[in-house]
Amino acid sequence: MAFNSDDPPSDRPPSEAPLWLGDAFNSMAVMPELSTPLSVDVTYVPRFHLPLPEGVEMPSAFQPIASDHQCMPFPGEEVGLLTRPVLANDKHQASYQVWVGKYPVFELPTEIRADWVAQRLRYQLEEFSLEPMNVRLVQRDGVPTLYLNDQLLVMVHDDLATAYDRSADLLAIAWANNLLIALGQSPMSLVEAQTQLYGLAYTGEVMDGLASWYGPYFHGRITATGETFDQTELTAAHPSLPFGTYLEVINLDNDQSVIVRINDRGPYVGERSLDLSHQAAQCINSEGSGVVNYEAHVLAALPQTPPTSSAALVNDHLIAQAQERLQDNPS
């Protein structure tokens, strides 16, 4: 099946759309009628912030999406595992949700991106409606990438993550879990998703000690690896472990865990042996206490082979086309 990419939809909201609580509209790409009961729709969402202004209620059509509440609790109401983020980039005055059945799965800043994702979803749901759906996360050229079966759905580049004011890894994981829920499957835990995304395997090596965290003061400074420290990434400092080592860090006070990558040296205070990024500390709920007892399991990265089927290659081409159009028409 070939996608019609000659005339992408306009990347603008309807002129009659109200600023806050107007009716959402659906924009369907040109595709054959589906034989599956799961529909895929693109819905325009006027920009609004949570919490909403006094006297303004969230319309029921705008259900919350994109949750990883373990790491990033957004303000506002939660609907199961789905929590709607607030776009942080003022450049985008609205957003476009991609719905699968009754669930919002993705929220993208432009209609072009949303329609490309919707086209790929429709193709998979039509062609493989009677087969189990395989949602897969991989790193593709260093970019968190979400596949459905062998079809590339979305690459979470830094610009997209910045629009949501969170790390690209966590945004990709949240969207993968949204899709799993929409397909009637169980969502992945944070560590399960990270293990898949990074292509990791446990080595059997275990360590323990005291873990602290560091953040705002060091944000933007250079780490011992030469990288710029980003407190929203899932990284950590250790006195001696090789750079690039992955650790599953378990907070022994609550059993919450997160996988971090060692990219800095430290800590140099007392008996502490691990310094987590601010984001990693949020993921294991150690931000408030500051210092916690931890157990860590060492993981090793395995070679990753992203799907290279013809469908994936076709979609790589479509992604390139969409990105070119976005560069030519950024507004």
Image (tube, helix red, strand yellow):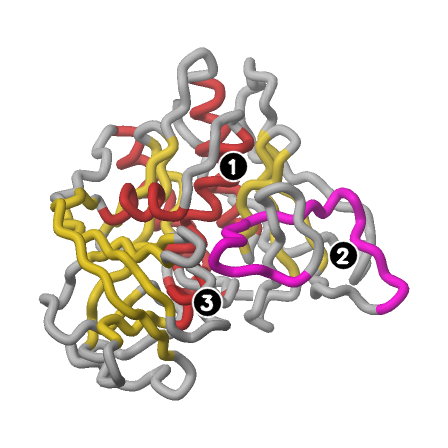
Q: Is residue 51 left or right of residue 325?
A: right
Q: Residue at x 79, y 53 (%)?
A: 58
Q: Which image quarter is the C terminus in? A: bottom right
Q: Residue at x 45, y 39 (%)?
A: 5
State the image coordinates of residue 74 (x, y, percent, origin top left): 60, 61
Which of 170 and 119 lies nearest the eye of the viewer? 170
179 above or below 216? above
Q: Earlier in the sequence, mark 3 or mark 1?
A: 1
Cα distance in 3D space between marks 2 and 3 = 27 Å
Q: Secondary structure at mark 2?
A: loop
Q: Earlier in the sequence, mark 2 or mark 3?
A: 2
Q: Secondary structure at mark 1?
A: helix
136 above or below 59? above
Quadrant of the rendered image containing residue 238: bottom left
Cα distance in 3D space between marks 3 and 1 = 22 Å
State the image coordinates of residue 207 (x, y, percent, origin top left): 18, 58
* Magenta stretch holds residue 62: yes
Cα distance in 3D space between marks 2 and 1 = 23 Å
State the image coordinates of residue 62 (x, y, percent, origin top left): 72, 47
Q: Which residue is mark 2?
A: 15
Count residues near mark 3 (Cα–Cα under 10 Å), then give few for <14, some for 14-19, many for 20+. some
Q: Which residue is mark 1?
A: 118
Q: Amino acid at mark 3?
A: Thr
Name the disc covering residue 162, or none.
3
Q: Which residues are magenta?
A: 54-75
Count residues near mark 2 (Cα–Cα under 10 Å), then give few for <14, some for 14-19, many for 20+. few
Quadrant of the rendered image containing residue 43: top right
299 above or below 270? above
Q: Secondary structure at mark 3?
A: helix
Q: Main secondary structure of the magenta part?
A: loop
